[in-house]
Amino acid sequence: MQQQVYFVTGTDTGAGKTFCTAAMLQAAAQAGRRSIGFKPVASGADGSGTNTDVAVLQAASTVRLPYALHNIYTFAEATAPHLAAADAGVSIEAAALSRGLAAIKQHGDFVLVEGAGGWLTPLCAQTDFAGWVAAERLAVILVVGLKLGCINHALLTAQAVRHTGLPLAGWVANCLSAQPHRFADYLAALRARISAPLLGVMPFLPQAGAEDAAAYVDISALLPASDAVGR
């Protein structure tokens, strides 16, 4: 099968990137793909050094791999990666992220790479996530956390992605509450202004797992035409 690799970014921290990424991984699995989630940089770890988001992506992947392959850097404090790295006396190296991506690509044909925070989250003094993704030439998926203010955040992010020269492969509208602010109006405004496929509208599902959430996304636009037939 032809391999697809996408970078998943969000309108901001808390937009629901991990939840939506896990849902898309499960949707890919249901389409017969060997799906793998990769979160190279994660902030916020438990006593064992494990990050919850990385663990969620690991569990949602169809290929069972060690935690270390799903993540390169995990930091204790849940804060901006460049700050957490500085506190830990570590420098986040873009080359290390690239080596990690190359390693995990060997195990699957549908790979979702989840960022941290938003599109321009700094990694170190020299680069940010946008710079690394541009160097890797990855198509981008945007998760929009539906709430007051998200229209501006979503449109600015979509514009920034395109100014980097990368394709916006699609976006997911993720409800952050049971009744998002003016849901229908906000969704209509976003659909009219984001010129990329809407991959799904994720309802507020605080207790749902990735397999159940997969029912609310349609990744056919992300798959080769031969794979998408009949979906």
Image: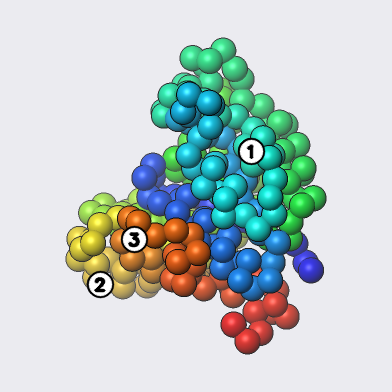
Looking at the image, is 221 positioned above or below residue 95? below
Residue 132 visible in the displayed image: no
Q: Residue 95: x and y, percent?
A: 72, 31
Q: Kindly identify the amino acid type of the residue bearing the numbered disc 2.
A: Ala
Q: Residues within 10 Å of mark 3 (few under 14, many from 20)?
A: some
Q: Residue 174: x and y, percent?
A: 37, 60
Q: Residue at x 46, y 28 (%)?
A: 46
Q: Residues within 10 Å of mark 2 (few under 14, many from 20)?
A: few
Q: Residue at x 49, y 42 (%)?
A: 53
Residue ID for mark 1? 67
Q: Nearer the viewer, residue 207 or 165?
A: 207
Which quarter of the rendered picture does the C terminus lie within? bottom right
Q: Residue furthest bottom?
A: 230
Label 1 sits on a secondary structure element that is helix
Looking at the image, is 199 positioned above or below residue 109? below
Looking at the image, is 105 positioned above or below residue 79? below
Residue ID for mark 3? 205
Q: Quadrant of residue 145?
A: bottom left
Q: Residues within 10 Å of mark 1 (few under 14, many from 20)?
A: some
Report how far apart the C-alphas of labels 1 and 3 lie in the structure: 26 Å
Looking at the image, is 117 positioned above or below residue 92? below
Q: Is residue 3 left or right of residue 155?
A: right
Q: Residue 110: x and y, percent?
A: 68, 60
Query: Given this view, does label 3 or label 2 mark the residue nearer the observer?
Result: 3
Q: Earlier in the sequence, mark 1 or mark 3?
A: 1
Which quarter of the rendered picture does the N terminus lie within? bottom right
Q: Is residue 119 left or right of residue 150?
A: right
Q: Residue at x 50, y 64 (%)?
A: 211
Residue ID for mark 2? 184
Q: Kindly identify the amino acid type of the residue bearing the numbered disc 1.
A: Tyr
Q: Kindly identify the amino acid type of the residue bearing the numbered disc 3.
A: Leu
Report how far apart the C-alphas of labels 3 and 2 lie in the structure: 18 Å
